[in-house]
């Protein structure tokens, strides 16, 4: 899993160390010129303290909402949180204190 730097429009979370953005499948090394192309981008994104309400991918200054956002990612949740019994007031790890990583998948 490759991590990419986090960014946001309007600077509201740009450079925020509590934003965890991981792009698992990003841009290919090259694209054929002169033909239409589609790009499938997927990964995870969550904030350690705030719940995200959406995700946009910006290409050449044009934002496009992620087709799916907030999808379950138990693999990331298990990676950043130690094993424990799940209870309503149980805080997660320092990396994910509110366990937002569980619903962090996007494409």
Image (cartoon, rainbow, N blue to C red):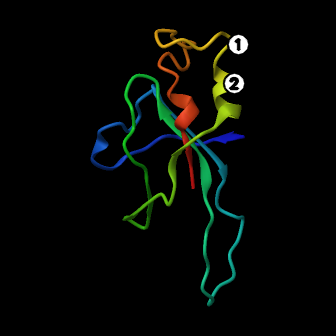
Q: Quadrant of the N terminus?
A: top right
**Residue 96 percent location from the top left of the image:** 53, 20
**Residue 82 percent location from the top left of the image:** 68, 13
Q: Which residue is located at x 50 percent, y 15 percent?
A: 97
Query: Which label sits on residue 3?
Result: none
Q: Is residue 48 above or below residue 53?
A: above
Q: Quadrant of the C terminus?
A: bottom right
| Relative to 39, 5 lies left or right | left
Disc 1 on helix, strand or loop? loop
**Residue 25 percent location from the top left of the image:** 68, 54
For mark 2, what is the residue?
A: 78
Q: Which residue is located at x 66 percent, y 10 percent?
A: 84
Quarter of the image where one finds residue 3: top right
Q: Which residue is located at x 70 percent, y 71 percent?
A: 30
- Within 10 angstroms of label 1, few (less than 14), some, or many (20 or more) residues? few
Task: Farthest residue to the front: give it.
Answer: 87
**Residue 8 percent location from the top left of the image:** 38, 46
C-alpha distance separating marks 2 and 1: 7 Å
Q: Is residue 31 above or below residue 33?
A: above
For mark 1, what is the residue?
A: 83
Q: Is residue 57 above or below residue 23?
A: below
Observer-nearest of 55 and 68: 68
Quarter of the image where one finds residue 35: bottom right
Q: Is residue 104 above or below residue 101?
A: below
Task: Farthest residue to the bottom: give it.
Answer: 34
Comes first in the chain, label 2 or label 1: 2
Disc 2 on helix, strand or loop? helix
- Within 10 angstroms of label 2, few (less than 14), some, or many (20 or more) residues? few
Is the Cβ of the residue at disc 2 closer than 8 Å to that at disc 1? yes
Count of residue discs: 2
């Amino acid at each position: 899993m490759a991590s990419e730097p986090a960014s946001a429009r309007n600077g509201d979370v740009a450079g925020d160390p509590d934003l965890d953005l991981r792009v698992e499948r990003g841009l290919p090394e090259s694209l054929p010129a002169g033909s239409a192309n589609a790009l499938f981008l997927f990964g995870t994104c969550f904030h350690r303290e705030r719940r995200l309400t959406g995700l946009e991918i910006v290409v050449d200054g044009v934002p496009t909402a992620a087709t799916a956002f907030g999808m379950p990612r138990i693999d990331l949740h298990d990676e950043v949180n130690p094993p424990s019994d799940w209870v309503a007031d149980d805080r997660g790890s320092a990396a994910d204190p509110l366990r937002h990583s569980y619903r962090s998948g996007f494409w």
